[in-house]
Amino acid sequence: MRVQLFATCLVDSLFPEVGEAVVEVLTRAGVETWFPPGQTCCGQPALNAGSRAEARALALQTLEALAAEDVVVVPSGSCAEMIRHRYPELLADLPDQLGRARRLAERTYEFSEFLVDQLLVAEFGASLPLLIGYHPSCHLLRGLGVDRQPLRLLEAIADASIERLSPECCGFGGIFSIEMPEISREMLERTLERIRSSGVEVVAGCDVSCLMQIEGGLRRAGSPVRCAHLAQLLVGRVAGLK
Amino acid sequence: MTLAFRERARSAIADSQLQRLLDQNADARQRARIEALQELPDAAELRQRARTIRQQVVFGLEAYLEKFATRLAENGIQIQRAANAAAANRLILEIVRRHKAELVAKSKSMLTEEIGLNAALEAAGIRPVETDLGEYIVQLRAEKPSHILTPALHLSIEDVAETFRSRLGVTLGDDVEQINAEARGRLRKVFLSAPVGITGVNFGVAETGTLCLVTNEGNGRMVATLPPVHIAVMGIERLVPTLDDLAVMLRLLPRFATGQSISSYVSLIHSPRRPGDPEGPSERHLILVDNGRSGLADTAAAEALLCIRCGACLNACPIFREAGGHAYDSVYAGPIGAVLSPALFGIRKYGHLAQASTLCGACTEACPVGIDIPGLLLDVRAQSEPKPLGRGIRLFSWVARSPSRFRWAQRVAAVGGRLLSRRAGWITQLPGPLAEWTRFRDFPPFSGRPLRSRLRRVSRPASERHPEIEPVEAATTTVEVVEPEDRPASFEARLKDLGGEVIRCAEFEAADRIVGQLHVLGAGRLLSWGPVEPILFTVLQRLEREGFPVVLPEVAEGPLGTPALRSFGEAKVGLTGAVAALADTGTLVLSGGSRRSLLPSLLPETHLAVLRSKDVYPDLERWLQAVGPAYVAGTSNLVLISGPSRTADIEMTLTVGVHGPRQLIVFLIE
């Protein structure tokens, strides 16, 4: 089987280590992975900022970049949700593109969803004697309904104990984090408090955007706790996002 | 404009008392909603049905309105439609003036807040008095409600006691019961003397011309029953097609609003007082308010018209929890407010509220009719003027529209990042507007080698293949649907949960038990139904023999005068029968009519009711099926009573007996 990796702009630019871990996991799962070079950003920042025209242009570009018939794997709940739900809405008035958008939506999977629901694999041989907190990110949980899949994968890590953290927004929200920093800070504080009180040693998630907010807060607070994308844990890495 | 919300949110965050109250609200209401939903075995299906029902109405609105208006007119309710707030206020004012009213009793209605009715009445020299406890407190303070359901959410018990001290000159302890009793006494006078009562409407039923009012305190019932003129004010979109549809909504609204399986009082009103009715206003009016709603019909924002104003999205929203309702500076706060305010009152003034969201979707998850609030917020953002940051995002998007530009930008960012991060660690200080990020969190440096330059074109697996796992099924909670075999028993259990009492007795001993109970209560005077059935007949006969004072609200002609009402109001105990009861919610169904006054179930502190076990139905749906819509439509005022009157308007502290009875005792006859 061959899949296209839609890495997302954040993983590509800020957290290439996460992307490498994703490829490593997929390779171990017996899947050929390739990186379509035409990809950049899915357009979600533009959509969220109210710039529909730019969002549409990036949706069309992504459609083109991922035009091969291979399944698309996205290591982000938020960007996968954008492709699955918002692309068909954004392109609703372009009949020839709408069909392509729907077909892309059908063959696009978030990373953990792809492993558990499509490949039916969960064991990658990692062993981490740690208390791992799982942060259910909003678009993954509420937008895609993906929750048990990452937990299933985490539970397969030898020696690890898993705690699902309360599914409350970490306060990232894209430009919200800059436009409403005071509220974003309060929401982040609540998230950090949940992490502190649960005593988890590493925070796992499937969205580097949220993890970047959380690890940014943990580092500023001088906490030794680090975040890791699910893929990093599956290959036994816990040193933080990068 | 973003600054306005941001500034207000900033002061809300700095206010530790407000933060405590907001946390208290969010925690209590969320927990209550989730628990209340767990007892509904078919919650997902019900929500889908509710959504379909509301869509049917919103997409066929004019036809439903026409049907509804026809029914209302047939039943003698005077109906007028107002295109905007000014027109609505003018129509209401005309009616109030025609009756020379200087005092108006109001029950909580967000629509009247929306149209600014109180200000319009005051400008005309008329005194509107809010009678919902929370709304009364907010009115005393000359503030606006901070939550569509819990107007005084932002106030502590000490604030409320201080308000009573400074505005009313009464010194009370920081005690909800004392405040409650004071408000009850003061507002009772308003109910009994106001010539006009104004209420909102929770749902209108097109098929039957029903005005449905849902309240907990009983003030809504008072306002719609006691003053000689009742004006109901309703948004044009608040319809459901049939009574069965209403039953679906009534299952969801209280559960999503407060976590109750049903509110204390649900009134189904069909007409003004008819000949033979012991009470009720001689005139009922309905003002249908458009105020921008019909303009949304063909837009994506029509989705927002599905809203049934339960307030669940406010309670679920992490932004509301920090900023509080007043930060929105609109009658509609929270997630739905950030959609409704720009849609109804203008995007120029309220478009910026759409920025106040991380699009986390907690609102949609909490919405009984599944409104796609994040999607609607994106629409509002798309229609708003771009902000400076929005321009930054446009620049980023332009860069991203070419992979080679993107690659070049990655290199520049990596160099910039290296200059900013002193060691190889995360960046602690970003320049320009991005400094907002690093005020309280670090930022990761851009990688010198992005993923696209690290990966081989194709990563091929070794031959090994992993063992497959069993497919992981979604955790489905199967709730067993148990058909209550013993309906009276489940009615009894539910009513007791609500704080009511049930005394089971046989037919032959019922009259003894009731008279005995009256003596125990030391009732000075009994307000009662007439002798319409054997037990009541025997009770009334015995009381007459004993010389026990009994008042039967039965007035042949003309409106109920204040003196008559006052004498009714002095009765400590009320005695009624019941048309039916509903086992699943512990509900009594009472229908007004000759010798079956609704006042004994409303005015006294204690309400005694006689119920026969054969009249206990499993639920509202099945009772409606048994009697049929024509029966319901033929009543002038039908009320579902579930436990004593209650409120949790002050700091979520539940108290009973705020306006209606504080005690409900049902004699369940085997």
Image (cartoon, grey):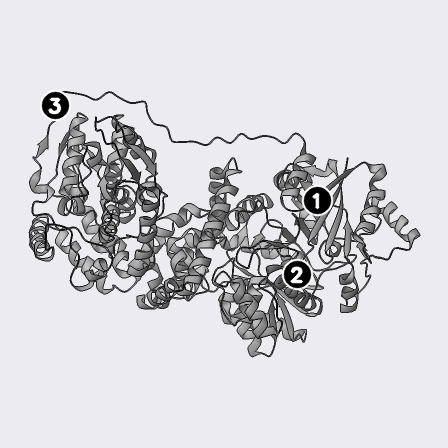
| Mark 2, residue position | B224
Q: Would you say B295 lies left or right of B572 here?
A: left
Q: The numbered mark 2 sits on a residue in which chain? A: B
| Image coords of residue A129 (percent x, y) | 25, 32
The residue identified by callout 3 is B462
Q: Residue at x 20, y 61 (%)?
A: B435
User: Residue A116, how many percent across, how many down?
Assistant: 28, 29
Residue B495 coordinates in the image, percent (x, y) = 66, 43
First of labels 2, 1 by sequence position:
2
Q: Quadrant of the C terminus of chain A?
A: top left
Q: Can you tell which mark lies on residue B629?
A: none
Classify mark 2: helix, strand or loop.
helix
Furthest-right residue in this view: B545
Mark 1 or 3, nearer chain start = 3
Label 1 to label 3, Cα distance in Å? 73 Å
Give the chain of mark 1.
Answer: B
Circle 1 Cα neighbour tier, 10 Å, few/some/many (<14 / 14–19 / ≥20): some
Q: Disc 3 or disc 2, which is closer to the eye?
A: 3
Query: In the image, which is nearer the foreground, mark 1 or mark 3?
Result: 1
